């Protein structure tokens, strides 16, 4: 399996023949294993040359850019090598047909809900008092139906997620990482900062996996396809946030791997320092490499592979081979 590279320093990505390296402002060179990379995450102020981008395109490497505030700003998405005109037409057909689009949107919300419930059940079995959140989430989910507009479905999913978030204080039991309420752009406390950062990383991971399918990331079903560059990755990420991002956060906080020293308080919000980002990414990367027994195939697969398989299932749904059913964790 190919790897990801992460750049936190300022500098320049350069190419020399068929090798590439990152040159820092101090003149230090760090060579990158170009043949083994699938993507590069760029958090520092980094410039890239046309020659480097030509090689990145040839080697099918995506570049994900984040700004000073950890916000995802964009992706260099190389020329699509698996794009299928037929698949794009099918994606558009299922988007434009309200009934077909609703089915996919409904299933994405179902997968998101069921994975949130699995997380709550896991911690309930370990003595955490989250029974009220479980009950409230189930009551909200029972209201979900195909007669709703997609906007109404999304609003209901948002209510379910807020109920789910309200369990975090009980699960974590750490006053430094109190949830309070969901805040974004900028997040206002440590926990919200971790949620936003983790979600941004997951969006780009799903985008990288889409690149290796016949799907076009610009056509989503739950999130409206509009002038925004990518939406399908936002859809699929909803299913995996509870079992990848949130469980990563629970591990980091419960093991005291992250603390107040890893954050910077700014006048308009909270930032996570580079050291904290590295700790988070390393733990999330370990999570993505973890293998589980996947009954559908009867073999061990990694969490990252599960994301690719979710996209394959969507492809099969679009071409009429089998109805799409979202992945639901069993542990």
Image (spheres, rainbow, N blue to C red):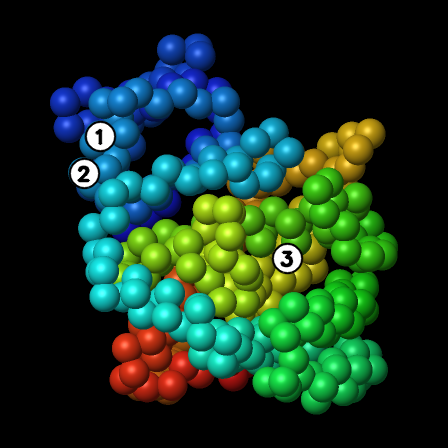
State which mark lies toward you, 3 or 2.
Answer: 2
Q: Nearer the viewer, residue 188 or 28?
A: 188
**Residue drawn at x 26%, y 62% as measured from the top left:** 214
**In-image side of 242 versus 189 (left or right):** left
Kindly report the distance in space between the C-alpha atoms of the residues bearing marks 3 and 2. 36 Å
Q: Residue at coordinates 78% horizontally, 37% vertically from top-left?
A: 269
Residue 129, percent across and down? 81, 79
Upstream in sequence: badge 3 or badge 1: 1
Whether tag 2 and tag 1 are in contact, CB under 8 A, the answer is yes
The N terminus lies in which quarter of the figure?
bottom left
* Residue occupying image coordinates x 66% and y 61%: 250
Q: Is residue 259 above or below residue 111?
A: above
Task: Work out how far the residue at label 2 is from the one at label 1, CA to CA, in angstroms.
Answer: 6 Å
Label 3 close to label 2 by CB (< 8 Å): no
How far apart marks 3 and 1 lie (CA) works out to 37 Å
Residue tagged 1? 54
Q: Secondary structure at mark 2?
A: helix
Res 171 → quadrant? bottom right
Q: Residue furthest top?
A: 26
In the image, 210 versus 231, the foreground residue is 231
Q: Is residue 263 visible?
A: no
Residue 58: numbered disc: 2
Give the crowd class for mark 1: few <14, some 14-19, many >=20 residues within 10 Å.
few
Q: Which residue is mark 3?
A: 249
- Toward the viewer: 125 or 15? 15
The percent coordinates of residue 66 (x first, y second) are: 53, 35
Q: Nearer the viewer, residue 331 or 214?
A: 214
Left or right for 286, reference 130: left
């Amino acid at each position: 399996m190919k790897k990801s590279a992460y750049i936190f320093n300022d500098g320049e990505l350069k190419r020399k023949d068929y090798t590439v390296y990152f040159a820092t402002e101090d003149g230090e060179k760090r060579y990158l294993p170009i043949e083994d990379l699938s993507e590069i995450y760029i958090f520092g102020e980094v410039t890239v040359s046309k020659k480097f981008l030509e090689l990145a395109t040839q080697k099918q490497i995506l570049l994900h850019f984040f700004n000073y505030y950890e916000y995802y700003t964009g992706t260099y998405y190389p020329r699509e090598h698996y794009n299928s005109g037929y698949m794009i037409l099918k994606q558009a057909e299922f988007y434009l047909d309200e009934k077909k689009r609703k089915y996919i949107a409904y299933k994405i919300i179902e997968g998101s809900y069921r994975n949130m419930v699995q997380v709550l059940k896991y911690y309930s079995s370990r003595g955490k008092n989250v029974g009220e959140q479980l009950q409230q989430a189930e009551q909200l989910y029972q209201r979900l139906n195909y007669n709703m507009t997609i906007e109404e479905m999304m609003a209901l999913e948002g209510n379910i997620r807020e109920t789910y978030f309200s369990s975090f204080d009980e699960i974590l039991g750490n006053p430094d990482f109190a949830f309070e309420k969901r805040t974004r752009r900028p997040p206002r406390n440590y926990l919200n900062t971790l949620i936003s950062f983790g979600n941004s990383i997951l969006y780009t991971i799903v985008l990288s996996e889409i690149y290796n399918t016949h799907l076009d990331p610009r056509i989503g079903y739950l999130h409206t396809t509009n002038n925004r560059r990518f939406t399908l990755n936002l859809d699929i990420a909803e299913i995996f946030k509870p079992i990848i991002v949130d469980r990563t956060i629970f591990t980091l906080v419960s093991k005291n791997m992250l603390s107040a020293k890893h954050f910077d308080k700014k006048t308009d919000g909270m930032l996570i320092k580079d050291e904290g980002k590295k700790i988070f990414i390393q733990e999330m990367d370990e999570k993505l490499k973890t293998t589980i027994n996947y009954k559908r195939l009867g073999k061990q697969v990694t969490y990252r592979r599960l994301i690719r398989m979710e996209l394959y299932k969507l492809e099969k749904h679009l071409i009429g081979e089998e109805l799409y059913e979202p992945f639901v964790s069993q542990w």
